[in-house]
Image: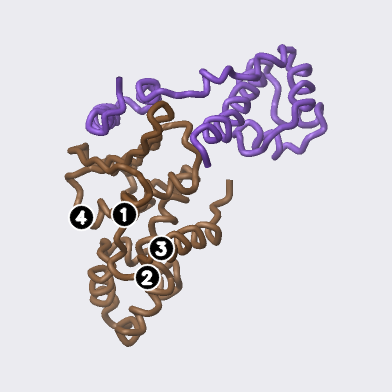
Chain colours: A brown, B purple
Amino acid sequence: MKVRRNYIRQVATDLLTEHGLMSLPIDVSGLIKRLGITVKSEVGAESFSGISFHDPKSGKKVIGVNSLHSITRQRFTLAHELGHFRLHSFNDVHVSAYRKRDPLAHMGIDPEEIEANCFAAELLMPVSLVLHEVKELGGMDVFDSDASIKQLAKKFKVSSQAMSIRLSDLGLLAIE
Amino acid sequence: MSERAQVYDPRLYIEIGRRIREARRRANVSQEQLAKEVKLKRTSVTNIEKGKQRCVPHKLYEIADYLDISPQTLFPSPAELLVPAEKMLDRVDASARPFTESIFKKAKVSS
């Protein structure tokens, strides 16, 4: 399966626009609540970010998130799990776990996981807002891109890692 | 989409696909072979098996015929398409089970 990047960008943008949430930081919890999905948090092993499932019997839609993770990571997890709800069929429970060996590959094998990550990035860091914020900064600091990334990450309420991946995906960051 | 619609679509197609794959493997037939025999593209067979492509009934009969199974065995009963929470839990990787279980409990979905 090919990762449907353009389609995913559209789905995420439409969702934010429709709910009037195109402002920073993106209110991902509010959005999920409005969509009738219950969020529960629980202490989990470091490698587990979250799960999502749809119980056909009760019709309940639930996202579980690891409460031990940082707020920024939990926000990414919420957006990632929401991605499964919007993009994938629910025949199963989706468990999102970081593969221990290479967390940077962010679960880079299963196409559905890649799509959910792609959705999370589009939702939390919409292109239009990223471009706007970078412009506000007066462009990326070429000599100290880390500082710019940190500032932007704070605005978007995401981890610096997620921010830097996003900027590089959008071609706004020179690849080291 | 209504809840009922969601049960049948996509679950029905996913289940039919799973059954085709199972039968094909049991018959020791490759996707290419099956595709050639029932005049489908190999990618169509892949997608049908994943539940991403909807196969028309007469093709399902052809597939069943070639794999030497009764076409009826490809169709799940409506009850089989409902996956209750407890069953979902069985499909979760063992290492993720405690976490999943307690989320289920908190969300009051398990029996």
Q: Nearer the viewer, mark 3 or mark 4?
A: 3
Question: Which of marks 2 and 3 precedes in the sequence?
Answer: 3
Q: Amino acid at mark 1?
A: Phe
- 3D distance between C-alphas at marks 1 and 4: 9 Å
Q: Chain of mark 1?
A: A
In whole angstroms, how far apart are the C-alphas of marks 2 and 1?
A: 24 Å
Give the residue type at disc 3. Answer: Leu
- State the CA–CA distance, disc 3 to disc 4: 20 Å
Q: Which residue is mark 1?
A: A76
Disc 2 target residue: A176
Q: How far apart are the alpha carbons under marks 4 and 2?
A: 28 Å
Do the residues under discs 3 and 1 have CB atoms within 8 angstroms? no
User: What residue lies at 44% left-to-right and 63% top-to-bottom?
Assistant: A18
The crowding category of the residue bearing disc 1, from other C-alpha atoms within 10 Å (few below 14, some 14 to 19, many at least 20), is many
Q: Are marks 4 and 2 in contact (CB under 8 Å)?
A: no
Q: Are marks 3 and 1 on the same chain?
A: yes
Q: Looking at the picture, which amino acid does disc 4 mark?
A: Ile
